[in-house]
Image (tube, rainbow, N blue to C red):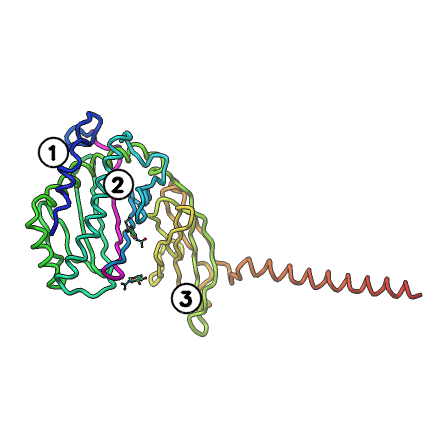
Amino acid sequence: MECWPVLLLWGLPQMWASPDALPPPGSSDHHFLPPPPSSAPLRFLQISSFANSSWTRTDGSFWLGALQTHSWSNGSDISFLRPWSQGKLSNHPWEQLQQVFWVYRSSFTREIPGFAKMLHLDYPFVVQVSAGCEVHPRRPLKTFFHSAFQGSDILSFQGTSWVPAPDAPHGAEVVSNELNKDLLVKSTLEWFLNVICPLLVTGLLEAGKQDLEKQVKPEAWLSNGPPPGPGRLLLVCHVSGFYPEPVWVRWMRGQQEQPGAQQGDVLPNADETWYVRVTLDVAAGEAAGLTCRVRHSSLGGQDIVLYWEGSHVPVGWIVAAVLASLLLVGGGVTFWLKKRRSYQHML
Ligand SMILES: *[C@@H]1O[C@H](CO)[C@@H](O)[C@H](O)[C@H]1NC(C)=O
Ligand SMILES: *[C@@H]1O[C@H](CO)[C@@H](O)[C@H](O)[C@H]1NC(C)=O
């Protein structure tokens, strides 16, 4: 296998000549960093598709906690999604970082087909990477680099070496043995995870503080779901438009939580807020008096409480029905008036 970090370490040495630069490869000291104001992991997600030995694309994104900060589509530079996406880096170190990622991407897409050939893998396949770090004011630095093949964990970089994932196919061991021979890849990765990533995340946490600490209040409403059976009702409590993601939603009778409620996945809205629904299957006679209670950090301790009062026909339908009847009545009146006028004409 070729050594892509050779390029990284010695191919671009002039980049590290400037005083305004990233800490050079090989350095491992990050004690100069002040502790961040709050914490959130910085995560780099990569997806590389290999359709055949000649067609491939790699796309990536960067996430600070739940906020996407950068996108990186195939063949382009990393682009900023926030005014603060450059963190505390000035232009020169940022450009160095772009270079590092360019080298990484081209080496990655060159090396993988080599492994595919060695292991007789069938095309098409997908390789994913999730890598990053978390700097916490009172805990040691946490770093991670996991990769997946066809959606299943295959190997990770732990401390100073590659480790196949538990239950991974035999190929994972072959690949990690091969990668472990490459000391330059390993030391570059260590440098990146232990020096560059904390530098990046600390700057981003500071620059993006306002967005990270944003609080948006939820709206909540109730509706009927499809009846689960004869004589039964499916009560649905919708909660939408909140940020951050953690939320507590329960069906209650008085102070008593109702067991058997089902919470769906918390889903993203298009405006970076979240949506969730919690359903409860009850006998029709027992629905009255139930409440849906919503607790969220934006509400300052004031829970939202919604009372179930009989059937909830969606408001949209009511509006549509009213409009339709108005149109019918209006149409009838116009028709009648027109008719009358034409009769008058004839007279
Ligand atoms: C490789 O895959 C691409 C995309 O699916 C396809 O357009 C192309 O014809 C394939 N090339 C070969 C040599 O099979
Ligand atoms: C992805 O980018 C690489 C390098 O810039 C390029 O060679 C490749 O053709 C691109 N793939 C697609 C599908 O556009």
For marks 2 and 1, the one nearer the N-term is 1
For marks 2 and 3, the one nearer the N-term is 2
Mark 3 lies on residue? 282
Front-most of 121 and 170?
121
Classify residue 44 as left or right of residue 326.
Answer: left
Residue 248 is at least partly visible in this image: yes
Task: Give me the residue at 12% from left, 47% from top.
Answer: 3
Crowding near the residue tagged with mark 1, few <14, some 14–19, many ≥20 C-alpha atoms within 10 Å: some
Location of residue 153 (image quadrant): bottom left
Question: Furthest-top residue in view?
Answer: 19
Question: Furthest-bottom residue in view?
Answer: 230
Mark 2 lies on residue? 40
Measured in 3D between alpha carbons, the distance from the residue under mark 1 to the one under mark 3, in whole angstroms, is 62 Å
Mark 1 lies on residue? 27
Give the image location of residue 86, x and y in percent: 30, 34
Classify residue 159 as left or right of residue 77.
Answer: left
Task: Give me the residue at 19% from left, 54% from top.
Answer: 147
Q: Residues in magenta?
A: 34-53
Q: Is residue 50 magenta?
A: yes
Label 2: element kind: loop
Give the image location of residue 144, x and y in percent: 17, 47
Give the image location of residue 156, x and y in percent: 15, 52
Task: Give me the residue at 27% from left, 52% from top.
Answer: 58
Measured in 3D between alpha carbons, the distance from the residue under mark 2 to the one under mark 3, in whole angstroms, is 40 Å
Label 1: element kind: loop
Label 3: element kind: strand
**Which corner quadrant holds the C terminus?**
bottom right
Dot 2 amino acid type = Ala
Location of residue 89 (image quadrant): top left
